[in-house]
Image (cartoon, helix red, strand yellow):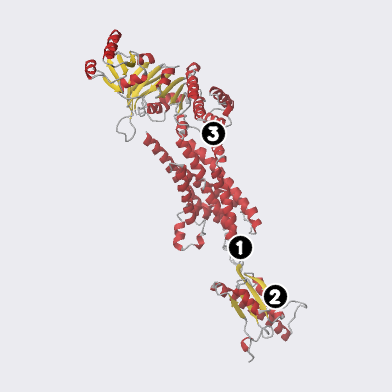
Amino acid sequence: MLSIDSLSYRYTAATAPALDGISLTIPATGIYGLLGPNGAGKTTLISLIAGLLNLSTGHIGLDGQPLAAARAARPRAIALVPQDYAFYPMLTTQENLRFFGGTLGLTRSALDEQVAHVIAFARLEQVVGKRAEQLSGGLRRRLNLAIGLLGKPQLLLLDEPTVGVDPQSRHFLLESIAALPAAGTTVVYTSHYMEEVEAICQRIAIIDQGRLLAEGTLEDILHSPLPLLEIHLDAPLPPPLADRYSAQAIGNRKYRRELPSAADLPRVLDELASHGCPVRDLSFGQHNLEQVFMRLTNRSLRD
Amino acid sequence: MSPRLLALWLKEIIALSRDRHGLLALFIMPTIFILVMTMALRDAFTPGTTIDAPYVVVDLDQSAHSQSLIRRLGKTASFQRVGISDDADATRHGIASGRQALALVLPKGFGERLLTPSGADGQPTEPMQLLVDPTLNPALQLAFRNQVMAALGALRADELTQRAGKLFGLPTIPGAKAEKDWPDEIVSIAVRNDANVRPPSSVQQNVPAWLIFAMFFVVIPVSSIFITERQQGTLQRLRSMGVPFRLILAGKLVPFCVVNQLQALLMVMVGMFVVPLFGSEALEMPATLPQLANWCAVSAAVSLAAVAWALLIASIARTSEQATVVGGVGNILMGAIGGIMVPKFVMPAGMQTLAGLSPMAWALDGFHMVMLRHGSFADLLPSLGKLLVFAILALTAAVWLNQRALATRS
């Protein structure tokens, strides 16, 4: 439903483009994860979809319509929940919700109904009369999310929605977001927390330095086309073995090498044991997102 | 009415009602200024009011003529008589100890020698003496001396008229007082368009002046909310929701213009009803409907200029602290050179020219044109025009700065 084609974007006076030829298709009713380290171009991509930046190169379409036309026809179709607490600290929870509902053009009865709906959805009943500046980090995140849902958006853009919240609130937020596609809302979820993305996203795009590095279902992304063995040893790998294995040091006594078949694994473990290098832990074949990202960019997602 | 605009207005009003510093700057500060400055400058604006230089008359003659002179002096009311004495030495001590600044000694035989001054008949005449505090302003000493001479001249003229009347058998009203109510004061008349009335009092100068100053202080709440919106990403969120920037501006202009009109109402009420409680005269508002409409037109133009200026400051400043400093200092400078703090007419010519650069001076000229000169709408056009051009320029600059900030981001 959201198609992005050859999208490039360069900020004024920037030396490198923030986005460089990105093409994606985000299907309806699902949660689409947009992963990348800080400065990768996630927020720029979100800002272009939200209409905060003007499109210069490439095309974005919503349900087959160019984005600008789709936004003009259905102004509430796309909602952005920014990373900042984008509401009024001096207003109460209820006043904030009524204000943003009003700016969406909601009339009295529809406004009452939608405000009540999002209060229930984000479980803000206990704090409706409390000023936003007095809310905890988790409640502020919930209010931020609730505001985004006031217009019953078809596409919800979430920019790092769980930054700075306690584990309970994070769990609640993730559960709530995971429930959104069932109510007909497609979610684009940007984050650099891989566990979150692994937990709730059906499809993922990994971008870095404005380029798309990988795109597909979570399974596709995590499946390593090249069986890699990552081992964590109790002692440094002796040089002769390191040469023979063509192993790459990836951390403190951590090494990575290609291993064509799982059948070779017992032999490798025996050799290591005989050289006085017991294995502390290892992974083979299926990788987590951090490892995939490391493999693709030689950088950590949290850089 | 657009629900979006209503929502924006309501938000500004709730936010302002919770901004204690903003409310203090908008309503309490100018009220205090008006009361304090009206009291402090009560006598500085009105010619002919009481001068704070008390005097004592030492009447050694105790005649009908000496008492008549004392009464005549008392009527002029410019200097304050604090007593009549018959002891010159005690009065001298009174001056030395600062109880009074002046003492007029009427010598014995003053009445008898009234029409034969300076020994015109060959007999010596004892002169009147003026005892003065040497620290008293020489201009005031001279003024008092002139008042005594004037009263003495009038007394002599009366006496002469009466004696001549008797001499020539002119008809007199039985029981009529020798002392006439001469129109011996010169009344200052302010030249206005319609009627000639007394010049403005301190309250008429101070209420519009501090009202203008207070209106420009919307810079504090306007920038506080605007900068919060920018820093918190709320402006971005509103943009992503399709709220155009012009609607956001309209959402601020209208509520703060209403707040400015509330300030005007409060300050006028203070001038009319509170200032008199402190012994000063009440504020006089225009009496006719067209003049009242002119007053409201000036008030609305000042308000537009003030809110536009506030939006410009809010667009320039990065933090609320910067806005408070830049806006506050800017207002104080505009007030200082614009004749708010020091009335323009006491400034030297060069400073008066400089005052012409301050929007607060244009605003004050506008209010003075309505309140003091009772000018027509056409007379107001120069002030209104300058204020509106200033408002449009400030708003344009604010919009341009915000668009440039977005362009830099993009």
SS class, disc 3: helix
In the rendered image, is residue B134 in sight? yes
Q: Amino acid at mark 3?
A: Gln
Residue tagged by mark 3? A134
Most foreground residue, B293 or B224: B224
- A156 displayed left or right of B271: left
Picture coordinates of residue B78, whole percent (x, y): 62, 69
- B97 displayed left or right of A184: right
Q: Amino acid at mark 2?
A: Lys
- Where does the C terminus of chain B fall, quadrant-wise? top left
Most foreground residue, B336 or A127: A127
Residue tagged by mark 2? B180
| Residue shown at the point (50%, 20%) measured from the top left | A176
Where is A127 relative to B285, above or below?
Answer: above
- Where does the N terminus of chain B fall, quadrant-wise? top right
| Residue shown at the point (62%, 84%) measured from the top left | B127
Disc nearest the viewer among 2 and 3: 3
| Residue shown at the point (46%, 50%) measured from the top left | B329
Picture coordinates of residue B233, whole percent (x, y): 45, 33
Q: Amino acid at mark 1?
A: Arg
Toward which corner of the image does residue B119 lie, by quadrant?
bottom right
Q: Residues within 10 Å of mark 3 (few under 14, many from 20)?
A: some
Residue tagged by mark 1? B198
- A54 displayed left or right of B300: left
Where is A247 relative to A80, above or below?
Answer: above
Tell me how far mark 2 sits from mark 1, CA to CA: 25 Å
